[in-house]
DNA sequence: CTGAAAGCGCTTACAG
DNA sequence: CTGAAAGCGCTTACAG
């Protein structure tokens, strides 16, 4: 490949010094460089297709136009990749790239990741979790925006119990409430929650929303079934709840879309038609599952794209506001993002209502 | 944060010059630096927890210890993230990081990605596709290992029709054959293939393997059903094949695990028990699906982790062999990686065999 | 208005 | 055996 043009090449072609090239190309030409030379420099730069060497720039400015991303498990993610996608898009719009390290939930690996990223001179740090959880940031917060001149840091799909870091998380409570409310609006009264695993933070929050909606409707809450997040867990839970002679619930709220797929399997095996005999709501809006179940699954969408975008934008804002460190946005603690209901075909009015 | 130690700091502490520090720390001490000074330098480096600034190193050596990855759609990937994981692990073991750009299948975006990566001085290039396909590398191959001093480039889960680039791909034909053979070994004779979409390269290859196995067994090949790769497609195809009064196939080979989930749904609705009444094989070993279907799905595993590892290792090997450019491994064209059968519970001997 | 110089942190010839 | 110098490509004070 032809050696990439340097500012020296541009200077030579324009017949000026490298300083002049740098000044003009960085918008500091007016008042410093004559109009004629400015034009010559611009023309030369265009002719040589010049763009500054990012590495040299980085050494000089101690900035890398790179956002370091540490994540606990993106490989196994599925839909969670959208978080990264959102962050990457937003970053790219400002000329930033993402340097992602997957720690597979290993704390030692995580420490190493931060050290590596620091060494690579990343301008900002984003920690993203596969599933919603508390995240205890490294004790050494010195690289953080807490200190003047520190590296801005932000959390996505996880939150700092100590509230030191800004965090973008899904509004799970509202999501659970909205899903329940939608069922209530369709006339359902006997709505069973198939919850995820007890360790899952999201699960508890969604249950909270469910209970709120039921209480607001003046309805008793039937026993919550602990299912889980996989197909077989949803299947087993559905079998437990639906395979009975007495009255069955008319609707189930599933831990996620995969569990809902298990419910579909159980319903099919029991000869129950969805949505005629049973209404089903999922959670996640998993693109590999929800749109393709038969019938297509009504579900609550997790705002992965939005979390990624918001987190990256927050970082970018801080990076831009370097003129005045006090001018930085002050949004500390968790910011809850909307989990919209995606209506498809798995809900109808109950037969006996 | 305390300013990171530089080689000057180490030199000062050890009472030597920066040159000496560099020499010793890069293993060129013997014969150049006295034993006493070597020891002093090592001690100083350890005390200051010194590691060279990667950015400065990069400017100096024109190397970045970074592998650029261009991918057509990793966000929507699911299991495909494992390819990146494999590449990242392998790269990390040699001190390399991955700089990933997702082009969302846009050629203009792709060109920009390569330019960006070149600007960032990546040492090598990896192109990874979400699903197996032909990949026409950019016309400007000048950054490629084709030319002396060019950037090594490799393909994963896609292949260069022109054979200019090394490529790691799954051995889909063997995968399709193995799945079929397994069914044959269990006594099945009437095995229907629910194929993916006609555009999908993998689908055609798997079908080829299926036909080979059937032919080798001296069996006629029943009409192949074009299904697709989503749950509803598998469902519809299964309904078409299974919902009949005459003899039904005793086994189906599915386009992928999600389509197999659709087959499960159809079977349940038709009152067919898997595996008693119907044996099912999937493809992909999708970790969100296959292990959790009821019964757990026997499937063919796609070697995403292995493709990522192999591609990264190939790049690393080339990067290491910089002493002699002629010494580079010559594995041009596609290298087929094994797709192992993962046996679970969805296959039994046919009732009428 | 303009160019020469310094310096970001590193390594590799080059003198001594 | 060792240190001073040059240079990777850039930008920002600093003289003129």
Image (tube, coloured by chain):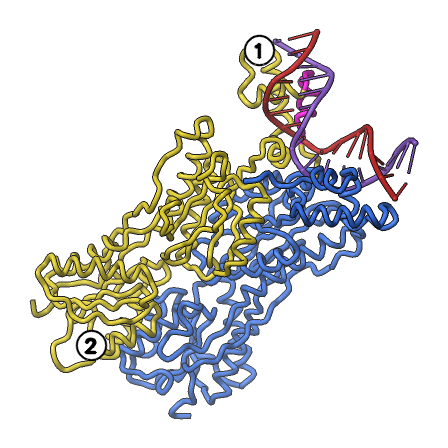
Chain colours: A yellow, B blue, C purple, D red
Question: The residue marked by circle 1 belongs to what chain?
Answer: A
Chief SS of the magenta region:
helix
Which residue was labeled with disc 1?
A35
Where's residue B242, x and y in %? 33, 79
Please state if A13 lies on the left or on the right of A210 as rendered.
right
Tally the numbered discs: 2
Asked if the stretch drawn in magenta spans residue A242, the answer is: no
Please state the horizontal and vertical placement of residue B154, each as a whole percent of the image.
Answer: 63, 54
Quarter of the image where the N terminus of chain A is located: top right
Residue C1 or residue B341, whichever sits in front: C1
Instruction: Give the residue number, with chain letter if any, for mark 2.
Output: A242
Q: Tell me the residue at 38%/53% (across/down).
A: A158
Query: Marks 2 and 1: in contact by CB < 8 Å?
Result: no
Kind of element beneath mark 1: helix
Magenta stretch contains residue A15: yes
Where disc 2 sits, the SS reads: helix
Q: Is residue A287 visible?
A: yes
Cα–Cα gap, marks 1 and 2? 80 Å
The 10 Å Cα crowd at callout 1, few under 14, some 14 to 19, many 20 or more, is few
Which residue is nearer to you in this view: A62 or B97? A62
Q: Mark 1 or 2 closer to N-term?
A: 1
Residue closer to the observer: A107 or A296: A107
Q: Position of residue A345 (x, y in %)?
A: 22, 61
Q: Report the span colored magenta.
A: A5-17
């Amino acid at each position: 490949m032809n050696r990439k043009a340097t500012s020296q090449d541009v200077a030579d072609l324009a017949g000026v010094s490298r300083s002049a090239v740098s000044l003009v190309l960085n918008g500091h030409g007016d008042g410093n460089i004559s109009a004629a030379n400015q034009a010559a420099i611009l023309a030369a730069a265009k002719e040589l297709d010049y763009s500054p060497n990012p590495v040299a720039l980085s050494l000089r400015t101690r900035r890398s136009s790179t956002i370091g991303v540490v994540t606990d498990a993106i490989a196994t993610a599925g839909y969670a990749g959208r978080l990264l996608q959102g962050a990457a898009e937003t970053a790219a719009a400002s000329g930033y790239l993402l340097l992602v390290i997957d720690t597979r939930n290993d704390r030692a690996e995580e420490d190493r990741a931060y050290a590596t990223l620091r060494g690579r001179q990343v301008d900002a740090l984003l920690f993203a979790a596969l599933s919603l959880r508390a995240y205890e940031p490294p004790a050494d917060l010195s690289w953080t925006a807490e200190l003047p001149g520190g590296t801005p840091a932000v959390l996505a799909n996880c939150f700092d119990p100590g509230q030191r870091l800004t965090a973008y998380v899904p509004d799970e409570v509202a999501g659970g409430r909205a899903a329940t409310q939608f069922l209530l609006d369709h006339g359902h009264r006997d709505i069973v929650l198939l919850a995820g695993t007890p360790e899952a933070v999201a699960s508890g929050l969604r249950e909270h929303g469910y209970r709120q909606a039921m209480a607001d409707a003046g309805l008793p809450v039937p026993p919550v079934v602990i299912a889980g997040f996989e197909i077989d867990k949803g299947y087993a839970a559905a079998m437990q709840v639906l395979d009975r002679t007495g009255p069955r619930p008319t609707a189930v709220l599933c831990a996620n879309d995969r569990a809902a797929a298990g419910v579909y399997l159980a319903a099919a095996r029991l000869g129950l038609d969805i949505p005629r005999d049973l209404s089903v709501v999922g959670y996640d809006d998993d693109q590999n599952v929800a749109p393709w179940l038969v019938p297509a699954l009504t579900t609550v969408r997790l705002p992965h794209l939005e979390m990624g975008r918001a987190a990256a934008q927050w970082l970018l804002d801080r990076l831009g506001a370097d003129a005045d460190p006090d001018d930085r946005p002050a949004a500390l603690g968790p910011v809850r993002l909307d989990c919209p209901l995606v209506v498809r075909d798995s809900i109808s009015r109950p037969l006996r209502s």
